[in-house]
Amino acid sequence: MSVDALDARILGLFAAEPRVGVLEASRRLGVARGTVQARLDRLQRDGVVRGWGPDIDTTAIGYPVTAFATLQIEQGSGHTTVAAALARIPEVLEVHTITGAEDLWCRIVARSNADLQRVIDQVVIVQGIQRASTVIALAEQIPHRVLPLVEAATRTSSTH
């Protein structure tokens, strides 16, 4: 699925102001309300927009420590089984299968460094995990973002 310039403008507006209504968005963008609604419906149906929930700051809810762990799993354990067990640990926010010496990459949060040790202890006792290596993030330089990618995709699709 490709996104065009109007899709990018709609996504940019709703990313900046998630509570803006469709009518107000149509007024600001200078397009019909039905156009904005149809585009939003299509973007959601096609999986471009995965949700409309709030973007929650983990520091603000008491989890200021972020760490990244790479995990090596036992051969034959299966990524899916291990990932399902990791999903039961609330502080494990993401898990990705990766290439290289390790098998999984995790983003983890904790209330403190001491609490991080507790979380890591929960991670390493998961059946199938052989080894873990963890690094603590000191500062977030670029927060999670996708709008620059949407804009780049728009430019790319308009040249093809």
Image (spheres, grey):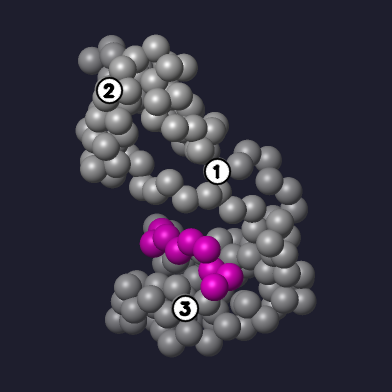
Q: Name the residue at the front extreme.
A: 23
Mark 3 to mark 2 CA distance (whole Å): 41 Å
Residue indicated by mark 3: 88
- Measure the C-alpha gap from mark 1 to mark 3: 23 Å
Question: Could you say whether the residue bearing mark 1 is in a helix, strand or loop?
Answer: loop
Front one among 53 and 7: 53
| Residue at (27% x, 24% y) in the render | 34
Q: CA distance from mark 1 to mark 2?
A: 28 Å
Q: Which residue is mark 1?
A: 144
Disc 2: CA contacts within 10 A as few (<14), some (14-19) or many (>=20): few
Please name the residue shown 28% across and 12% down the image. Answer: 159
Which residues fall within the magenta stretch? Answer: 90-98
* For residue 70, side relative to residue 87 (left or right): right
Q: Amino acid at mark 3?
A: Arg
Residue 150 seen in the current view: no
Residue density around tag 3, few if under 14, some if 14–19, many if 20 or more, within 10 Å: few
Q: Are marks 1 and 2 in contact (CB under 8 Å)?
A: no
Residue 92 in view: yes
| Left/right of residue 86 with respect to residue 111 in the rendered view | left
Which mark identifies residue 4? Answer: none
Residue 35 got which mark?
A: 2
